[in-house]
Amino acid sequence: MDDASLDEFLDDADSGDGADAVEDAPGATVESADPAVDPATTTYAWSASAVTCDACGTDTDRRWHDGDGRLVCPDCKDW
Ligand SMILES: [Zn+2]
C-alpha cells in the first residue's frame, strides 16, 4: 500500500486552476466597537444597607458619585 504523499496535494495546488485562491474582500473587517459610544460608567451607587455620605456623613441608602471620587447623599450631590 502506498501512502498518500503530501506531494500529491502540493501537486494539486500547483495545478493552477486558482479555485482555492479566493481571498477575503478587502475592507470587510467588522468594526466591533463604536468609538462614539462611551463605555458604561457607574455614576450611581445603591446599597441595601445605610451608607454614609462621604461629604456630610449622613446615613443614606442612595449615593451618587460627585465627580471627585466620593459617594455623596442626594443632598450633597451637585445636580
Ligand atoms: Zn451628604
Image: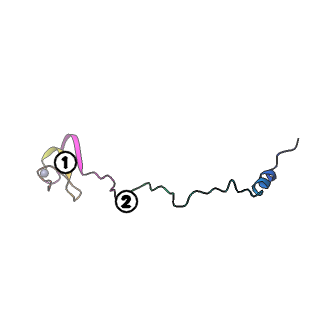
Image: magenta residue range: 36-55
The N terminus sits in image quarter: top right
**Is residue 12 rendered to the left or right of residue 34?**
right
Secondary element under disc 1, as helix, strand or loop, is strand
Reading the chain from its start, which is encountered first: label 1 or label 2? 2
Residue at 67 percent of width and 57 percent of height: 21
**Is residue 39 rendered to the left or right of residue 63?**
right
The image shows residue 70 at horizontal and vertical percentages of: 21, 55
Amino acid bearing label 1? Arg
Label 2 crowding class (10 Å Cα cut-off): few <14, some 14-19, many 20+?
few
The mark tally for this picture is: 2
Whether residue 52 appears in magenta in the rendering, the answer is: yes
Tell which of 45 and 33 is nearer to you: 33
Tell which of 48 and 26 is nearer to you: 26
The image shows residue 69 at horizontal and vertical percentages of: 24, 57
Residue at 32 percent of width and 52 percent of height: 40
**Pointer 1 and pointer 2: residues touching (CB < 8 Å)?**
no
Secondary element under disc 2, as helix, strand or loop, is loop
Amino acid bearing label 2? Pro
Q: Distance from label 1 to label 2 (Cα)? A: 29 Å
**Among the 4 quarters of the image, the one containing residue 68:** bottom left
**Is residue 2 rendered to the left or right of residue 6?**
right
Q: Which residue is mark 2?
A: 35
**Among the 4 quarters of the image, the one containing residue 37:** bottom left
Q: Which residue is mark 1?
A: 63
